[in-house]
Amino acid sequence: MLRLFTIVFSFALLSSCKKEKLDPMQVPAPLVEEPDFILEAADLNYAIGTTWAYSVSTQTQTFYQTSQTSYYGHGGGTYTVKVIRDSNMTTGINGKVFQYFINGTNYGFKELQYVNPSTNLFSQITLSSVNGDTIAPNGFCIQLPLTTTSKWKNFYYPNESRIDSFNANGFENLTLQQGYLKCIKFTGNNIANGYWYNKKIGLVKGESVAYSSPNFQTFVVETSTITLTKFN
């Protein structure tokens, strides 16, 4: 994937007679129109303990040149992302460290997310689990403020045509259980990688397509989709 780190791996709505605090994923209610928005740096400054749960679905299609046939495979799973601490970078920029969990187990995979005030780029960078959170090369960025017409360059991969630039494609309402969330959608160069961001929740959905050819006679297309199931 776009190195947005698609880790190929529902929530039940509880109700009772007494009035209870709504799960954030129950808001907005059905048929309530969310206003248009611009995604700004303050929207992405999540508190320690903020948690996202995602479901993952994958489809693999393998083409065999010798037989002119194809094979379909399906898979999926779930994972959770949690803000575990603040991070004061060596550049003096404040960031947040996100930890990934699979089936409740610490996966060891972490991300650094921060906004550079000099460029207004919101970056998500892989952190290695070795040697005290060494920054790994994987990463991508979002130009802030993000509007429905934003365009920007991904300086982490300036020479890779699939992911070296992005552009926003307007608003889309994504249906999630009892309601929907209005999101700004943006895509990479080849439109195979798509991302949907909500003002309050951040990443709601991501799609990616990866191509590989393990040998001269085999071609593999893997499509992955992550969808938010819970946020708190």
Image: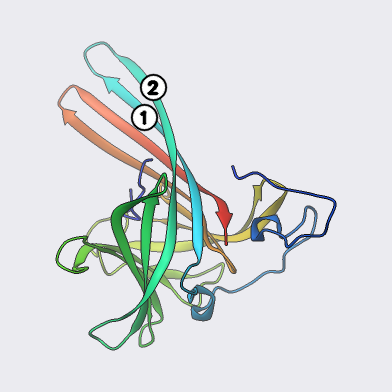
Q: Are marks 1 and 2 in contact (CB under 8 Å)?
A: yes
Secondary element at tag 2: strand
Q: Position of residue 126 (x, y in %)?
A: 27, 62
First in sequence: mark 1 vs mark 2: 1
Asked whether, in this view, residue 160 is left or right of residue 178, the answer is left
Residue at the right extreme, as displayed: 17
Provide the residue designation for mark 1: 60
Q: Quadrant of residue 92?
A: bottom left
How far apart are the two marked residues, 1 and 2, measured between alpha carbons? 6 Å
Provide the residue designation for mark 2: 72
For badge 2, the amino acid type reads Tyr
Mark 1 nearby-residue class (10 Å; few <14, some 14–19, many ≥20)? some
Q: Residue at x 46, y 72 (%)?
A: 48
Quadrant housing the C terminus:
bottom right
Q: Residue at x 55, y 71 (%)?
A: 147
Q: Position of residue 41 (x, y in %)?
A: 49, 79
